[in-house]
């Protein structure tokens, strides 16, 4: 389960990390084929389910061809994204920056 004290700290000044965020959701996995059978499993797709994520994504990256809310892929067989912090369009990151600057 998620540690809510860490979530509160994340909103109030720390740089958030998608791997510990309660809004990160594993939405699907790739198919197992002969090319990836030797790995621990298939990679997964991680999406941000924060209510403000699509709006914030479109404001920060207006002409991006990426899917709004897409965080990244997991390592084969893992359940957390490979990104170490959060994308620059993350709503929690923007709130954290606003809280620390004033």
Image: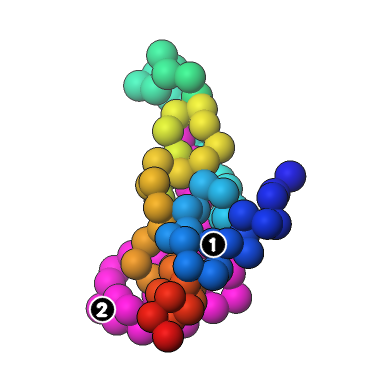
Where residue 33 sits in the image (x, y, percent)?
43, 24
Q: Quadrant of residue 4?
A: bottom right
Tell me if residue 36 comes above or below residue 61 in the rendering.
above
Locate the C terminus by quadrant.
Answer: bottom left
The number of numbered discs placed on residues in the rendered structure image is 2
Q: Which residue in the protein does label 1 denote?
A: 10
Residue lying at the far right in this picture: please name it. Answer: 1
Q: Please provide the residue range marked out in magenta.
A: 42-69
- CA gap, disc 2 and disc 1: 28 Å
Residue lying at the far top in this picture: please name it. Answer: 38
Q: Residues within 10 Å of mark 2 (few under 14, many from 20)?
A: few
Q: Which residue in the protein does label 2 denote?
A: 63
Q: Is residue 61 visible?
A: yes
Q: Residue at x 40, y 41 (%)?
A: 82
Where residue 80 sits in the image (x, y, percent)?
52, 41
Q: Residue at x 68, y 57 (%)?
A: 5
Q: Determine whether the residue tagged by mark 1 lies in a helix, strand or loop.
A: helix
Q: Residue at x 54, y 70 (%)?
A: 12
């Amino acid at each position: 389960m998620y540690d809510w004290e860490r979530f509160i700290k994340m909103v109030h000044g720390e740089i958030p990390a998608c791997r510990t965020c309660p809004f990160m959701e594993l939405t699907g996995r790739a198919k197992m084929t002969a090319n990836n059978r030797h790995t621990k499993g298939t990679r997964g797709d991680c999406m941000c389910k924060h209510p403000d994520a699509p709006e914030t994504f479109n404001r920060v990256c207006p002409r991006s061809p990426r899917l709004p809310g897409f965080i990244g892929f997991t390592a084969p067989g893992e359940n957390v994204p490979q990104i170490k912090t959060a994308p620059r369009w993350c709503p929690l990151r923007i709130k954290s920056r606003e809280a620390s600057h004033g």
